[in-house]
Amino acid sequence: MNTTIRLTKASTAISSFLKERKALLVLGTMAGVTALAQPAYADITVCASGCNQMSIQAAIDASPDGGIIRIRPGIYQEILAIRDKALRLVGAGSAVTVIDGTGPYTPERVISLNCATVKKIAIDGLTFTGGNAGGLENLGCKVSLDNSLVTGNSGRRYGPKDGVYNNGIMTIWNTVVSDNVGGIGNDGTLEISNSSIIDNGPWGISNYGTLSGSNVTVANTRGRGIGTYGSGTLTGYRIYANAAETSLPPADLGRVVTGAGVSNEGDLLLRYSLVLSNTGTGKDGAKGGGIYNGSGSLKLVGDIVTRNLAAPGTYTDGGGLFNAGGTVSLTEGTAIVNNIPNNCNDTTCP
């Protein structure tokens, strides 16, 4: 059965940023301490003609720590890097402000963020595409990615890479991550809200760190929807139409597919979420078409797990949920129903 994905664009009012910083006045001395004036920085603008800079990287290099860069509509064919600098990159909207990493580069992500000490980097209203080693990488920074699109990034011959990779502190809000060779990879602390992770492969979200968030769609992955090996608290997730096959990487899927919708080897709390129409197809069968719990701790609270398929094979079991030996709890009316060939790998679900 074909599944049609409808992405509802949230109509959200975006807070406007201050265009300039006012210097503090030296008002006098209190208790022997003099108030020092701080410099005001003008925003740096970027466009093809008539702005402060013609390239985004030139604006990054010219900007002071804590500066704001406003990027006018256009397609900017660049590879970007921010190192040890707090910045705010503000586009005119992801539909009209595109950073395109396509080109004869060595393996590069479209934008790399690297902080030896934590710096805040805010990104708003941009598209990142064309990276030949992924889209966006965060190493050690505190990053917010809002109202943006990360799409069409690949590993090419260098192998799968994430559209977004986080090994720092990161929030993703009202953003679409789609059509990448690898959706989101997390080794740090990541919160995703009001976003869609769709049409990626071979994973939607791969979490080895701490994952949280709410109101997220993970769908149509050409592989596993969500794999978590760290900790996760996910609320209001819609995990559907993901299809894991042994003919697809990663190699750990093996001959028996485990967890086409969700695979857990860590500590996962899934709340008020829908796991629907996910399919595991292995050469020797599948375990957990909807959800697979290995040696981890899985808590399902008010969830619906339905119409998932573990395709026939020698070792096929648990169309809805397969528990391989970890701990599983179902509370607040969690329903595991109408899965094929059965709902759980035990006679009755936990």
Image: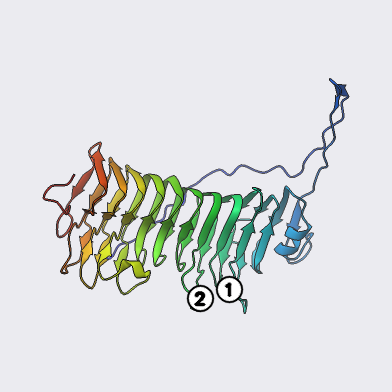
The N terminus sits in image quarter: bottom left
The C terminus sits in image quarter: top left
Q: Which residue is mark 2?
A: 158
The answer to whether residue 37 of the structure is visible from this angle is yes
Q: Amino acid at mark 1?
A: Pro
Q: At numbered mark 1, what does the secondary structure look like: helix, strand or loop?
A: loop
Q: Which of the marked residues, 1 or 2, is nearer the chain's N terminus?
A: 1
- Counting from the top left corner in percent of width and height, residue 291 is at 27, 54
Residue 210 x %, y %: 46, 48
Residue at 37% from the left image edge and 57% from the top image edge: 227
The answer to whether mark 1 and mark 2 are in CB contact below 8 A is yes
Q: Is residue 175 left or right of residue 325?
A: right
Q: Which mark is residue 107?
A: 1
Gap between marks 1 and 2 measured at Cα: 7 Å
Residue 272: percent from left, percent from top: 32, 42
Query: Can you say whether 27 is above or below 204 in the image?
Result: above
Comparing 308 with 106, the one in front is 106
Is residue 89 left or right of 252 when viewed as pictured?
Answer: right
Residue at (60% x, 66% y) in the render: 110
Task: State which quadrant residue 270 falls in.
Answer: top left
Q: Callout 2: 10 Å neighbours few (<14), some, many (20+)?
A: few
Q: Which quadrant of the view contains residue 196?
A: bottom left
Q: Residues within 10 Å of mark 1 (few under 14, many from 20)?
A: some
Q: Residue furthest left?
A: 347
Q: Tag 2: residue type?
A: Tyr
Q: Residue at x 25, y 45 (%)?
A: 328
